[in-house]
Image (cartoon, rainbow, N blue to C red):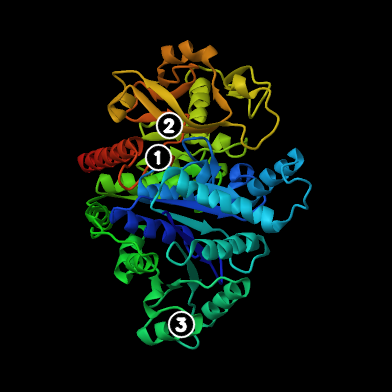
Amino acid sequence: MTKFIFVTGGVTSSLGKGIISASLAKLLQARGFSVTIQKFDPYINVDPGTLNPYEHGECYVTDDGAETDLDLGHYERFLNIPTSQANNVTTGRIYQYVINKEREGAYLGKTVQVVPHITDEIKRRILLLGHQDRYDVVITEIGGTVGDIESLPYIETVRQLKWELGSNNCLVIHLTLIPYLKAAKELKTKPTQHSVKELLEIGVQPDILVCRTEYPVNKEMRRKIALFCNVTINAVIESIDAETIYDVPLLMLKEGLDKTVMGKLKLTSKEEPNLDKWKEFLGKLKNPLHEVTVGLIGKYVELQDAYKSIHEAFIHSGTTNECKVKVVSIQSETITPENVAQLLGPLNGILVAPGFGIRGVEGKIAAIKYARENNLPFFGICLGMQCSVIEFARNVMGWQQAHSTEMNPDTDYPVIDIMESQKKVNQKGGTMRLGAYQCQIKKNTKAYQIYNSTLIYERHRHRWEMNNKYLDLFEENGLMATGTNPDTGLVEIVEHKKHPFFIGVQYHPELKSTVDNPHPLFVKFIKAAMDYRKKRETESIGIS
């Protein structure tokens, strides 16, 4: 029978439920169990696709086209297995389903209520993922903080499932905070006690407490927490601040979180967790032989979570190259033709990030022009790729008014235009070109050298595309379409013929980069940045 683990959070948000869930899943996976993780978000949006990145961080996209919470990125990066629509459910989606069923007459005239109708639908979706795909363990992260009104239906569902499934098949891990008071020079357990009390009032007794802390939690304090929170001492797990999120699985292994979980769920495994590859990754991450500085040019750089997958892909690809990647975030609105050389001159490469809308686009175009003219490694993703097409049209082909119809519907040269399939779409949510699509790569191109394949599958999230009406003229002038969708002809990859590394992609490669499989585009981009730095240093020595 599938075992179910629920991860709740208390005291404050942003304690790292997603990282703890992914770390536990990694440890169980390393012991030979099949594991998946799902996230239940308490907001009423059907999905995060229409949320501003400043509001909720990046919108992660799965192979099957689901727009999901960014925590699913952590799940995939740790476990190296794809997630799907079923791995992220929001309150909006739950209520939408129940209301639609009510309109169909499915409830036989009964009054539709939070209990049992909403909780039953939450329960159905939790159990479906486990039974349908036959996982040994399903870890369910409950978004928000215990005590929030929005989270109550989820906690009530957990209470019911604990009773229905029994203690051998279901447990609750509560992530909480032990703050350090500088004035008193001591850690305080009272917030944890009150958080557990809040859970108890709803009818849920946590089985394991994972305590976020800046300082070690001694044995005496663990006994105190165990006594007042009704858990065993070995179920009080210290989660001390880590240098990197990739340290957390090993810290949880040291704390015995996986063993405690296995003991309570009566799981048996003959395997000790095999984390050799993970440890090798960490060793390279913490002991780089090289260093490069790359610019991340985007519209939402003030919030790192807005480009979370890109930052993590830099870590994966840097480690593969045994290189520390220092990322300098540059707000594209601040870039002008006058200051672009000053801003980008010290860099070894630039990545122009995805986004929507006209704000900051001219800054991105100015940055791309500098990279093209100075042989600075350039990597453009989605809007970043589209801006490279606009820049080339303006400054190489002489079409000064070239633009995207997203920014200027009346442009004389619509080198980027809305996709035909999107022209009649009126609703915003869930209507873009989403999920994994084929891309056919031409041989004897950089893209082919990078992928070593003529057919790839990458994830998309966009409405606009390169206008094939101008494709021949672009290629005559040196901007080549080296990857296209075989069914629609949509341009997926562009390369500059004479540039050492100038690649733009319509898709989002950052979404498929994991610890075990860093994305090859990022790996080669970092290698190009290393070569660029080495070349500049050699030239500098030659001049001196």
Provide residue 466's location: percent of width, then percent of height.
Answer: 52, 21
Precedes in sequence: disc 3 or disc 2: 3
User: What is the C-alpha distance between the residues marked 1 and 2?
Assistant: 8 Å
The answer to which quarter of the image holds residue 49 is top right
* Label pair 3/2, CB-CB below 8 angstroms: no
Q: Which kind of residue does numbered mark 3 sit on?
A: Ile
Left or right: residue 420 versus residue 26 is: right
462 in relation to 189, above or below: above
* Label pair 1/2, CB-CB below 8 angstroms: yes
Q: Which residue position is annotated with label 3?
A: 225
User: What is the C-alpha distance between the residues marked 3 and 2?
Assistant: 47 Å
Q: Which residue position is annotated with label 1?
A: 512
The answer to which quarter of the image holds residue 11 is bottom right
- Classify mark 1: helix, strand or loop: helix
Q: Which kind of residue does numbered mark 2 sit on?
A: Glu
Q: Which residue position is annotated with label 2?
A: 458
Provide residue 508's location: percent of width, then percent of height.
Answer: 46, 36
* Label pair 1/3, CB-CB below 8 angstroms: no
29 in relation to 208, above or below: above
Provide residue 407's location: percent of width, then percent of height.
Answer: 64, 29
